[in-house]
Amino acid sequence: MISKELQKRILSSIILIPITVFFIYQGSVFFAFFLSIFFLTTSYEWIKMNKKNSFRFIGILYLLFSSYLIYLLNHNFSFQFILVLIICIFTDIGGYIFGKTFKGPKLTRISPKKTYSGLIGSFILSIVAALIYIKYTSFGEATYLEINSMLLVKAIENNKLFFLIIILFISLISQIGDLIISYFKRLSKVKDTGNLLPGHGGLLDRVDGLIFAMPASYILFYYLN
């Protein structure tokens, strides 16, 4: 039987993914509008969460920087954008499923629910999901033009190990992002960053890994292209 917490994670993904995909395929202007709402909402949650410490301004600057690089990632590397989104989602789900199932030693005091089994599960599910995405995506000549990254093309075609390393890197950054936001929640003595998604917490709770993984991915694909 699926636990309530897992139901929340799956439901939040069901809500957020179609909305994100809709704005992606509507074009740059619509996606920029979507990111503006994204930035304003996460900034509001960040300010509210950190109203008693001095990290508010730095956090807003980072969210602005992150939103801008997310826009560039989608604009310049649309294929990779979806890939990174999938990796982040299944990193979160994999960590929860494996952590709850196998339990084991705690990973860090910053987030007491995080375990080493969850860490491994995050990597496993992110790899599986990314490979399925690659396998069932039309990878013909048109897709090569859409990918616009010789790094990823060569990794998929000639060096499967390097492609796995790319997936693991993105998943790792996503998990680090989760821990960073968990640290600030712990510092502010709050359970969630907000209550925008009833029963799920705030938007920042759901995209904590993504706001770190996507900027890092853009930098990776840009400089290694």
Image: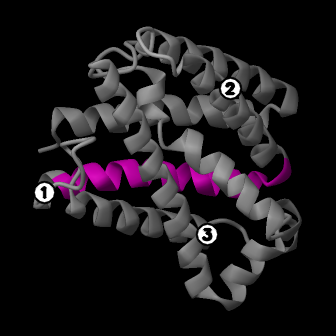
SS class of the residue under badge 3?
helix
Instruction: Compare residues 131 and 107 and report the one nearer the observer.
Output: 107
Which residue carries the number 1 mark?
A: 101
Q: Give yes or no for contact between labels 3 and 1 (Cβ–Cβ under 8 Å).
A: no
Q: Residue at x 33, y 14 (%)?
A: 198
Q: Is residue 97 magenta?
A: yes
Number of labels in the image equals: 3
SS class of the residue under badge 1?
helix
Q: Specify the label residue 134 is tagged with.
A: 3
Instruction: Compare residues 68 and 142 and report the one nearer the observer.
Output: 68
Q: Residue at x 83, y 75 (%)?
A: 150
For this view, does 204 lie left or right of residue 146? Answer: left
Q: Residue at x 25, y 40 (%)?
A: 6
Instruction: Kindly indicate the quadrant of the structure image that contains residue 111.
Output: top left
Magenta segment main secondary structure: helix
Q: Alpha-carbon distance for marks 2 and 3?
A: 34 Å
- Give the number of the mark in front: 3 or 1: 1
Which residue carries the number 2 mark?
A: 61
- Res 132 visible: no
Task: Give the amino acid at mark 3.
Answer: Ile
Find the magenta span and give its range.
76-99
Instruction: Compare residues 116 and 207 and report the one nearer the observer.
Output: 116
Query: Image height check: is 109 above or below 164?
Result: above
